[in-house]
Image: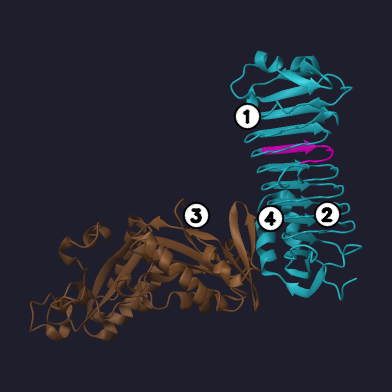
Chain colours: A brown, B cyan
């Protein structure tokens, strides 16, 4: 996968969040949304290019072209339209995709280009004042789909543990959990009986089908949730999985958490394999 | 390695073109070959060691000591490395420079940074007219890089400037930013008359209210410019000498112009004012 990071700043953190939440909306899976995106972390004013409160957002897609297609559109519709915001590159690499490069035309000829420290910024006059946007943002190789499954007694038990896991994963830089709340309620398998469908429900882990299909679930499991992690490299994904699994395991069987597993897909999906036994060592 | 030192033995009578003394042109030369380089001195050519005592070996770091205003074309066409000068220098310092750093501990003459394409020029004293401009016949003035003047500058700062940034700690003369195509000029003290005369695009930032603003500039009112937050934060992080930018905020009075030209340039006055003068 390919990834980029963008930095959104605004007059207050609240408005930076508004823009960040908007740009990461409908971006849970590359299969249906074109990209996976989430808030990576909050940024202190001292960490942002313009000294205002900010949010780092990471966007993952299957190719640079897909990112090129998704990111400018999302910045244009979700960040530029949010009051008082500005948008900057969060990655500086040789490979770049447009950010303000295409958005500048919104300025209808009144846009102004400025180069600071070798980086080009566009000043687009807008009704709230001025929308400042860096011309490009860097793209890097990344890994998507690091995952683990949490098997609990009920959905409430599994959800409580997963919420704690996502909280811990958020503390790791360089990773995101793109699904709503960081948790997948309907994990999928590759393919389907229907030819037109690329992914379908993972029946081996559906508790309601335990007696109907070749189930992977023990009798006591009544709900399975999945946490999917995208990251910039293997190390950060392993670290995120480790802290997540430890957080889930801290609940234990007495609190309704029975097993941890992972979507393996027969070992055929993706170039990277994360073995849970090695990760939790 | 020790910096390559050129110490002037006596004050030259005529202008001395030191453009051959750049890291690019001295790279790989032995000390003997460097001493034998002929420099244009008035109407004649004389070898380097007649005028300079030369020591050291690091051609990437060149120092000119006891310099006077007779030395011209310091760092002309250089693309990397560093030239430090103790004393004044004459005209055309950093002309057509493509990279590297020139630091002058003294004053410079006219046409400093003439049509420079990149790099960094720092002058601790004052500079003459046409800073960062382009000579007649050059397509435009400086097209990238940074010029930082601790003292004052003469007239026509950034004339026909294309890109890059000029920062002047002191005062600037008349016609600052005249015929600018783009780029940024920041004057932290008073600027003379007719700032931005004929500018098409570009930004002139004045920390103090100028005595005069041309009639062809239209007031856009007192505003908070988001870009200035970015500019001042980025500048203040560039080193201690730029820490002064910490004290400036985004509040400005914006004038757009020159309406007699393209009209897409701007003069930003960091002190907000009630109405145009």
Secondary element under disc 3, as helix, strand or loop, is: loop
Protein chain holding label 4: B
Q: Nearer the viewer, residue A230 or A103?
A: A103
The answer as to whether the residues below labels 1 and 2 share one chain is yes
How crowded is the residue under tag 1: few (<14 C-alpha within 10 Å), some, or many (20+)? some
- Verify CB contact (< 8 Å) between mark 1 and mark 2: no
Q: Is residue B16 magenta?
A: no
- Of circles 3 and 1, the one toward us is 1
In the displayed structure image, the side of residue B223 where residue B24 appears, left or right = left
Task: First in sequence, mark 1 or 2: give its number.
Answer: 1
Q: Is residue B110 magenta?
A: yes
Counting from the top left corner in percent of width and height, residue B79 is at 63, 36
Range of residues picked out in magenta: B101-112
Structural distance between the alpha carbons of marks 4 and 3: 19 Å
Which residue bears the numbered disc 1? B24
Quarter placement of the N terminus of chain A:
bottom left
Which residue bears the numbered disc 4? B235
Structural distance between the alpha carbons of marks 2 and 4: 21 Å
Protein chain holding label 1: B
- Residue appearing at x 90%, y 58% in the figure: B193
Mark identifier at residue A92: 3
In the displayed structure image, the side of residue B261 where residue A226 appears, left or right = left
Secondary element under disc 4, as helix, strand or loop, is: helix
Specify the quadrant of the image occupied by residue A13.
bottom right
Residue B156, compared with residue A276, is above or below; it is above
């Amino acid at each position: 996968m390919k990834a980029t990071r963008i930095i959104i700043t605004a007059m207050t953190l609240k408005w930076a969040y508004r823009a960040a939440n908007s740009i990461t909306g409908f971006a849970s899976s590359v299969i249906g949304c074109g990209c996976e995106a989430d808030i990576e972390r909050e940024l202190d004013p001292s960490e942002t290019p313009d000294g205002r409160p900010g949010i780092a957002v990471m966007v993952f897609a299957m190719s640079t072209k897909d990112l090129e297609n998704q990111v400018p559109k999302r910045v244009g519709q979700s960040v530029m339209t949010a009051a008082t915001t500005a948008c900057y590159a969060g990655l500086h690499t040789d490979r770049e995709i447009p950010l303000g490069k295409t958005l500048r035309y919104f300025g209808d000829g009144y846009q102004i280009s400025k180069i600071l420290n070798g980086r080009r910024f566009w000043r687009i006059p807008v009704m709230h004042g001025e929308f400042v946007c860096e011309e490009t943002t860097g793209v890097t190789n990344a890994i998507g789909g690091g995952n683990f499954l949490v098997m609990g007694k009920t959905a409430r038990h599994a959800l409580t543990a997963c919420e704690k896991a996502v909280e811990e994963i958020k503390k790791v830089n360089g990773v995101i959990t793109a699904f709503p709340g960081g948790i997948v309620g309907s994990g999928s398998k590759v393919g389907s009986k229907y030819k037109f469908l690329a992914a379908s429900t993972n029946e081996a882990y559906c508790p309601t089908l335990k007696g109907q299909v070749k189930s992977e679930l023990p009798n006591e499991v009544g709900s399975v949730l999945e946490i999917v992690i995208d990251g910039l490299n293997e190390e950060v994904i392993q670290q995120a999985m480790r802290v997540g699994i430890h957080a889930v395991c801290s609940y234990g069987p007495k609190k309704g958490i029975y097993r941890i597993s992972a979507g393996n897909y027969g070992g055929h999906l993706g170039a990277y394999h994360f073995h849970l036994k090695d990760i939790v060592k | 390695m020790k910096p390559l030192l050129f110490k002037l033995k006596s004050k030259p009578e005529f202008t001395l073109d030191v453009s051959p003394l750049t890291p690019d042109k001295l790279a790989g030369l032995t000390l003997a070959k460097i001493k034998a380089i002929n420099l244009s001195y008035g109407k004649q050519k004389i070898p380097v060691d007649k005028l300079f005592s030369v020591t050291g070996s690091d051609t990437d770091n060149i120092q000119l000591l006891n310099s006077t205003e007779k030395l011209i074309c310091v760092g002309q066409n250089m693309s990397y490395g560093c030239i430090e000068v103790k004393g004044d220098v004459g005209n055309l310092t950093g002309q057509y420079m493509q990279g590297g750093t020139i630091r002058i501990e003294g004053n410079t003459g006219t046409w400093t940074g003439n049509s420079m394409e990149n790099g960094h020029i720092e002058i601790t004293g004052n500079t003459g007219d046409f800073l960062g401009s382009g000579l007649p016949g050059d397509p435009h003035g400086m097209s990238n890089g940074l010029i930082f003047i601790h003292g004052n500058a003469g007239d026509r700062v950034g004339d026909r400037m294309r890109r890059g940034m000029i920062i002047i700690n002191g005062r600037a003369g008349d016609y600052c930013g005249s015929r600018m195509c783009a780029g940024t000029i920041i004057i932290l003290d008073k600027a003379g008359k007719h700032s931005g005369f004929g500018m098409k695009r570009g930004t002139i930032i004045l920390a103090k209210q100028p005595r005069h603003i041309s009639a062809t500039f239209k007031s856009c009112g007192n505003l908070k410019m988001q870009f200035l937050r970015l500019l001042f934060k980025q500048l203040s992080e560039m080193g201690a000498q730029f820490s002064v930018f910490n004290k400036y905020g985004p509040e400005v009075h914006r004038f757009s112009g020159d309406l007699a030209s393209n009209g897409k340039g701007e003069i930003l006055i960091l002190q907000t004012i009630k109405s145009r003068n």
